Image (cartoon, helix red, strand yellow):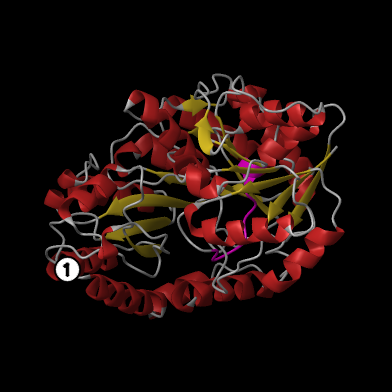
Amino acid sequence: MKVSFVIPPCYDHKQPAERSAGCTRVVYPAPNIYELTVAAAVRAIDGVEVAYKDCVFCKMKSRDFASWAASDSSDVYMIWTVNLSIESDLQAIADIRKSHPDTPIVLMGPGPTYFTEKCLNGDANVFVVRGEPDETVCELVEYLRDGRQPDDSIKGLSRFIDGRVKNNMPRPLMKDLDSRPFPARDLVKDQDFHNPKLKTGPYTTMFTSRNCPYRCIYCVPSSLSFAREIEFRREHNRKPTIGFRSLESVEAEIARLHAEGVKAIGFMDDNFIWNEERTAGLCAILKKYDMRWGCEARVDAITEPIAKMLGDSNCCYVDLGVESFDDKILEYVKKGITVADIYRAVELLEKYHVPVKLNILIGSSPLETRETVLHTLAEAKKLNVDQVMFNIVSPFPGTEFYKICKENGWLKGNEYVPTDVQRQSILELPGISSSEMEKLLFHNNLRFFFSYKFISRQIRRFRSWKEFTHSLRALKIKLFG
């Protein structure tokens, strides 16, 4: 049986959805390691051949997708769907149906986990895998391989049957992440991935944990963690527990990547730094294999020993989610940090020569005004950080912020519409309009990324013309689409 993992083309003629992070459009290419991990697990099933078709990478036009599908002989199609890709993916399914009316199609990711009925679309041969997909997908593939009709026993599965949506019982969270195979990166070996913040390659992404325990009301973590969280909250009304990989498992994967010639890793963990002991182990592994790397972390996790570990182990960036330089806004969004914490973290990382990227989120609270945004932007620019990323909050369904916005009528059109947080707003807050937020975002991006300080700092770090052109292309997409 042939199972094909497909990334459909973008039917709306915009930048394609970024399916790993899940809330933006592609700025620079990166492998979807969550999908590739599922692909590796499916490939281990007896009698199953796995293929991978990335229509975005091969620049396939939407008008050509139906022709490709007509010539393809897959027995099952798998699509990792995020909110921004739902409409394109549904059109891709319609094109597949022109030549494969009964072929099973499986959707997974945060999009179908939340918008289950919309994604099933009344098709009895479309299946939605909710939440953490690894085990559910493998069980479903075994049913399909054996010619059995998927039934109620497959936990985490939704399907359209007898004229209605049938949601099977949720699947418990995986307890042993070490049991998962490493991502099937060989399926994308022809793709050239890069990260402008690392400025070297070959590059890939990786994770050492799943989910984050903190209570930020707006937060959409990685697309896997968000799917996991949406599903878990339905039953337990709280965030899911964190899943960790052992240091031994992490080292085994990094050793393999090193043997394959990989030189740079961007860690996709929602929060990479948990404590000094685990961080010391991870940094020692990365230093041993001479990797250039970067991660995401909370400012209150940065202690002096941790900052020193990062500096000593070739850490090339730390993404800090600071969101605002207003303590009242930070308190409202339940960030669990103060402005003083931000300054201290940046000071420590700079002391040990670790480049810092600040993530600023405009409009995350009804306390936001033009003045608070301008204050945050001014404070961010005063700090001697490597980069500042400005985004506009989107009230994603499944978050506490969505409920607040819905109840108060702050959503344009009174409902969520998938939106690129790097460019657009669907919020009309009491103190600031969507158009004001969009203008502030665009103008401050221009001021920061075209500043002499930013340009001179970045140019000194490029190791090749190729890396420079990759970064320039990413900047153009970020600013102008």
From the viewer's perspective, is residue 396 above or below residue 255? Answer: below
Percent from the top left, x then y, of residue 75?
Answer: 81, 43
At x 61%, y 41%, the residue is 34
Residue 215, picture quadrant? top left
Q: Looking at the image, which residue sits at the far front?
A: 162
Residue 93 visible in this rendered orientation of the protein: yes
At x 62%, y 71%, the residue is 470
Magenta-drawn segment: 26-35
The residue type indicated by label 1 comes to: Ile
Q: Secondary structure at mark 1?
A: loop
Residue 475: say if magenta.
no
From the viewer's perspective, is residue 158 above or below residue 241? Answer: below
Percent from the top left, x then y, of residue 316?
Answer: 51, 53
Q: Quadrant of the N terminus?
A: top right
Residue 31: say if magenta.
yes
Please tell me which residue lies in front, 11 or 185: 11
Residue position marked by numbered label 1 in the rendering: 432
From the viewer's perspective, is residue 435 above or below residue 402? Answer: below
From the viewer's perspective, is residue 180 above or below residue 406? Answer: above
Percent from the top left, x then y, of residue 135?
Answer: 63, 26
Please tell me which residue lies in front, 441 or 206: 441
CA neighbours of label 1 inside 10 A, class few (<14), some (14 to 19), many (20+): some
In the image: residue 401, left or right of residue 73: left
Majority SS type along the magenta span: loop
Residue 196, picture quadrant? bottom right
